[in-house]
Image: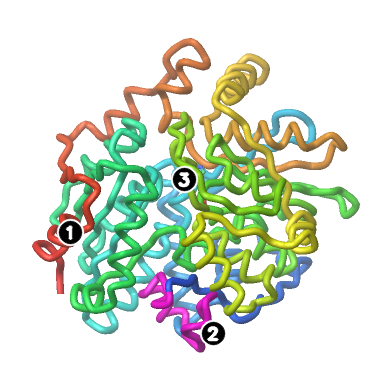
Amino acid sequence: MKYLSTRGGEKDLTFKDILFSGLASDGGLYVPDEWPQIDYNALKKIDSYSELALEIIYPFIGEDIKKSELKSLIDNAYAKFSKSKIITFKNLKQREHIVELFNGPTLAFKDFAMQLIVPIFDYYLLQENKKLNLIVATSGDTGSAAINAVHQSSKINIFCLFPKGRISDFQKKQMTTVHGDNIFPIEVDGTFDDCQNIVKSILVDRDFSEEFSIAAVNSINWSRVMIQIVYYFYTLINNNISEDEIINFSVPTGNFGDIYAGYVGIKMGLPVNKLIIATNENDILDRFINSGSYSIEGVTKTTSPSMDIAIASNFERLLFDLLQKSSVMTSEKMNELKNNRSFSVTKEQSNLVKKTFSSKKINQNEVNDLIKETYKEFNYIMDPHTAIGLGASRVLNERGDNNFILGTAHPIKFSDTVEKAIGHPMQSTNEFFEMYKNEEKFYSFMNSAEEVRKVIKDNYSK
Ligand SMILES: *Cc1c(COP(=O)(O)O)cnc(C)c1O
């Protein structure tokens, strides 16, 4: 499998190349040059999550890692998940299923990618006897998942930027109480997008990132998307679905990484009708679906902070497809976005998007009501992000299709919001917080790329 940049500046790259560089030097995102085709009926016979992951991921990696070695990396990664089943399902109403993706060590779906990417990095680093300095911008869950995974590594340092006051207390503790001489949490006085911009500015500065052996594991890193494709297949294979049923996935969406993985799944042969973009008040994608215009607005702080973004970074990958893989046109649109803070697509292009995607914005009051009512009716406690997925699914499912809602985080991660909605403390709160009772240690800066660079210079490993 070869990879190229959506903006045309790089091509013929291997999986390893793009894993390590994350963002293309022309500012574009890496995409594979073709979609591997999967025989869905053959896949159906596989019931182990790890084996399924191997079949789906291997074609994207190709000769870079031997299949048997990849298998053991995958087996080890998913052995760290708590339940005997890596994914659990909760059926609410008939044809309304929550896909619980929060059985990993840090209780959000980000663990699926992080627990595997870090060992893949280690695998390459060990071969070359090198060290790596990972940099990540997080709206909460990516950072904790990455820190948990990197903590075990003797080859990797992690510099993790999170926005001050815009993540939950539990998320912050998950990042700041894991002590190790390779762990550097950095609080930035700004939004997630500010953190992301600092990371991008460091990554595009090739001299700096090469000198300090820097790589990124943001949702723009292709390997995360690739790994997340697996659970779409797993979900359908592990629920008895007859051939004639119409299936949709509702995906709580911020950076468009998770749902884009579903899109790639469809390109590979996943039998799904629609992907529902479920957003909070930060609704750039919902506005795009409704108007054909992609336009940046300020970030609103909500009770679903992992989706508080101004730009959906992975959207450029879909745009590239939509523009028939024209890197010239993709670059034009992205430049327009940079200069005018918006761009539009044609009516035909917009209709093409709507063939696969629909969208719905769910506001904070609705989230509160959804958590409350779901608890009353089904005795089931949902986190606010998952609630947005459920809300969007219900509004759009007039026909009674079979809808799967991605449960993206455990409710304990957002206990303040959840407890307000259900009206009493969650059980087991203490037990979870007990895991993160260490003293908090982290850097705290203004919104400054310079200060972040300095921390890296002072602490990087060669
Ligand atoms: C990251 C995250 C999302 C959004 O996923 P994207 O890939 O950024 O669209 C939704 N919910 C939770 C709990 C998350 O951590």
Looking at the rendering, the stretch of residues picked out in magenta corresponds to 2-26
**At label 3, which amino acid type do we have?**
Ile
Badge 1 element: helix
Residue 83 showing in the rendered view: no
Q: Assess whether residue 336 is covered by the magenta stretch.
A: no
- Mark closest to the chain's N terminus, 2 or 3: 2
| The N terminus, quarter of image | bottom right
What amino acid is labelled 2 in the image? Answer: Lys
Q: Residue furthest front?
A: 340
Could you say where residue 156 lies in the image, as x and y percent from the top left?
A: 24, 65
Viewer-proximal residue among 204 and 96: 204
> Which residue position is annotated with label 2?
2
Q: Distance between the residues labelled 2 and 3?
A: 30 Å
The residue that disc 1 covers is: 450
Q: Can residue 239 be seen in the rendering of this structure? A: yes
**Helix, strand or loop status at disc 2:** loop
